[in-house]
Image (spheres, helix red, strand yellow):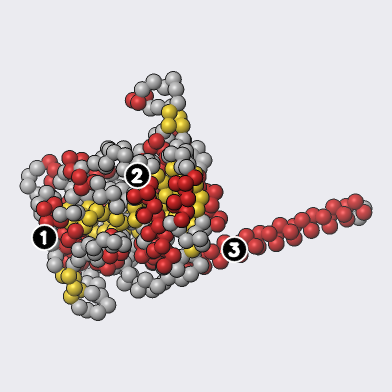
Amino acid sequence: MAPRSLVFLFGFLLLSCIICALGSGFFLERDNALRRMSAVGGASASGASITGIKILYIVTSIAEYDSGKRKTIEGRDRFVETLIPVVSESVQSMLAAGYQVDTYLIAHYSLRQDRYDLLRESLPDTVGLDLWDDACPVGYPKASEGSMDYIINVTRALARQHRYVIKDKLPHYDVFVNFEDDMLIRGDHVQQYLQVSAEIDRLWHSAPTRLDPATTRTATTVEAALDSFHGPMSKIQFARMIPGFIRVERAANATGFQKRTRPGRIPVEESYRDRNTGQYNPVRVDPKPCCHRPGESLAASSDLFLWESHIKALGIRHIPESNLLDWVLLQRGGSPAKMEVEELIGDYWSGRDGDFVLGLPTDARPDPMESIYSNNQGGWMATRKQIWNWHTRQCWGGFLPPFSSTFIYPMDGMNHVVEYWSGGGNLYGRLACNLQRIIPLDPPQFSRHLLYHTSNNKQKQLKFVKGLFSRVDTLLGQLHTVRKRAEKVMEQENIARPG
């Protein structure tokens, strides 16, 4: 072999060794991060968490001062009176749970240095703080918005910008917590999300890829699949499941406000049997995880109201071989359109026993895509592993930029509404990931899926949410009534009652 060839061969082998070494380091760091995420996801239900998990907490803020719209006070310093307390409390809670936290603020406005310093001083020195101000993208108006001869700030697309941050930071954090500036996020919320995610992952690993029609009651039509609320599940179904959240507000005058609610005709179950102790406990939410704030009196469970769904639209499902999940609420927002039957996750509809039958056109179950029932979350959270799976496998057009699919992301995604990006619509919507959000019906767990909308202004906009506001306790009690009915059906089909 010629000397030049030997030199080339030696150089090639040396370069290969360097690449392998670098690659090994990358995959070792990736595997270590996944082990940390798995450890947190499998932590005990008592709330203990594992240190070493790195969270990037991303906050999006549209206004430095309130505009007076949506029942806010014009000129009120939203940055000082809402954003800073919410971010500080959220960060402190996540730190107390044992997580490492950095914060990233995305703002529509330009933030002066002295204002930035106020936020910086509210956070511990160990918490990093990045700022992307004046972050609103520009583009041409929609045809319905006027002349397309000039460009404007597309303010609805500010809610999209966190995706660029996540793509940039994806290798460096284990969990991404992305919410609007008035949503209070606690360490309990992160812990609950990771625990439920880990349980879904465990069930996915043990489930068959597809159900065998010879050994299971497999639905063959869309209607039958959507009505199937118990029995074995497949990997295909578990791959679509994620934990969900419900926004709530605290009513200043809960007794008076209750008179204006429309809870529906489902009776309210008052007690449930704890699967671990066998004791019967009241069906009540615990307001402390979501809604107790420094300097305020502790809210009663009866003070909490929701407005973005209704018992009439909802259904429940039994998750087999899972003590953690057992019975879960299936939130709305997805669509069976263009999905295979084996992908569908059915439920026991609350109106299955005729509570809503009055001979009216409105007696039918609302369409799953009807937005008023789909629980805009004000944000979402996910592990790095989940985000990568959504981007590469689950979501039409991908989950991270570039948003190259003009069908899923017209105008680079800027045509989509705020709720599509920051409310979680991209996760559960049809032109997106079509994931199915679930919430365990166990009251202590259910309570950790409630998020406090600290602006407390939705309850003042009743003309927009008329007929939807109801007490969270009432909804949970109604869901437990539906659970008891579903268990009876399972018994009639010779399926043992869980517990």
Q: Looking at the picture, which amino acid does disc 2 mark?
A: Asp
Q: Residues within 10 Å of mark 3 (few under 14, many from 20)?
A: some
- Of 435 and 125, nearer the camera is 125
Is the residue under label 1 in contact with that under label 2 (CB below 8 Å)?
Answer: no
Residue wearing tag 1: 267
Indicate the position of residue 352 as horizontal and vertical percent values: 16, 55
Q: Quadrant of the C terminus?
A: bottom left
Secondary-structure class at tag 3: helix
Label 1 element class:
loop
CA gap, disc 1 and disc 3:
52 Å
Residue at which label 3 appears: 29
The earlier-in-sequence mark between 1 and 3 is 3
Q: Amino acid at mark 1?
A: Pro
- Side of 307 where 80 appears, left or right: right
* Label drawn at residue 406: none
Quadrant occupied by the N terminus: bottom right
Residue at image point 13% right, 43% down:
362
